[in-house]
Image: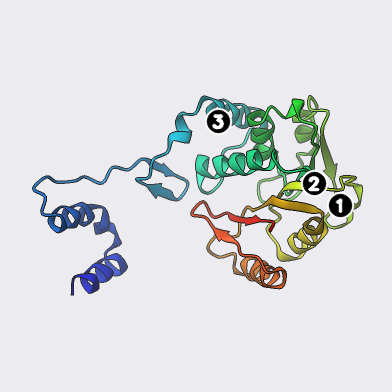
Amino acid sequence: MINKLKNKVRKNLPFLVPVLGPVYAALRDWRLVFIPWQMQYSQRGLITDAACEFMKDPRFVRSREIAVKECKQQPPTGGDWRLYTFAWAAEHATKIEGDFAECGVNRGLTSRLIVEYLDFKKSPKKFYLVDMFELGGGYGNCYEETRDVFAPFQNVKVIKGHVPEALSRIDGKKFAYVHIDMNAPEPEMAAIDFFWDKMNRGGVVMLCDYNIFGRKPQRDAWNEWAKTRGVSILQLPTTQGLIIKP
């Protein structure tokens, strides 16, 4: 009875959950103290009471500030938690043999955060950034600006062109981290087909828009691809998808 009532409230009156949740918890445990729901994070569509210690991490905060300032771009859906997920994945990939790549760069916010967070100048790895840099929808032509942002990094290569044609200019043989964000199934499938067999075990594939509501064609394409490869895609509340190469 109680579970049915809870499900009805969640479905029909979700705005009451933050209020009724603590009351239910208090009654359930026979507590006389009201336990308030304390929001810890609210950015770009993601609200949670989970601990967010990364928001106080000096290395992350500094890297975020530099990336936002130099790229003149704010964090997308999911906010800083999305950026932190990229940073975590990239740091994990530093322990795996192979280079980094990003297909769908825009102004370079994510990749600039990563190179700062990892002190990438000192890394033996290369980071390939592939994009047309001239789409509409507010993106504009940002090739020269993005190229200048990464000019101080000798091991970061900015490649202008369409996928899959532009992938032929990538000379890396092995990869540990690949981020794909091209907003369409065809180039994204072409990108993963190019990189997957070049990725080492434990390598990370980050999908920027996999879990965004309304992007069903992309999600369907990725799910079908995952079935053929025998892997699973982790759905994240930041709207990302995460794949670990087995």
Q: Mark 1 points at which residue?
A: 167
Of the numbered discs 3 and 2, the one sitting upstream in the chain is 3
Q: Could you say where residue 73 lies in the image, as x and y percent from the top left?
A: 61, 36
Q: Earlier in the sequence, mark 1 or mark 2?
A: 2
Choose between 68 and 95: the one closer to the eye.
95
- Can residue 211 be seen by looking at this rendering? no
- Looking at this view, name the residue that lies furthest to the left: 32
In the picture, the disc for residue 60 is: 3
Q: Is residue 20 placed above or below 153 in the rendered structure?
A: below
Horizontal side of residue 112 vs 155, given as left or right: left
User: Considering the numbered disc 3 on the image, is that residue within a helix, a strand or a loop?
Assistant: helix
Q: Which mark is residue 130?
A: 2
In which quarter of the view is residue 89 placed? top right
Residue closer to the observer: 34 or 94: 94
- Contact flag, marks 3 and 2 (Cβ < 8 Å): no
Which quarter shows the N terminus?
bottom left
Above or below, comparing residue 151 to residue 174 in the picture: above
Q: What's the distance in space between the residues labelled 3 and 2, CA to CA?
A: 24 Å
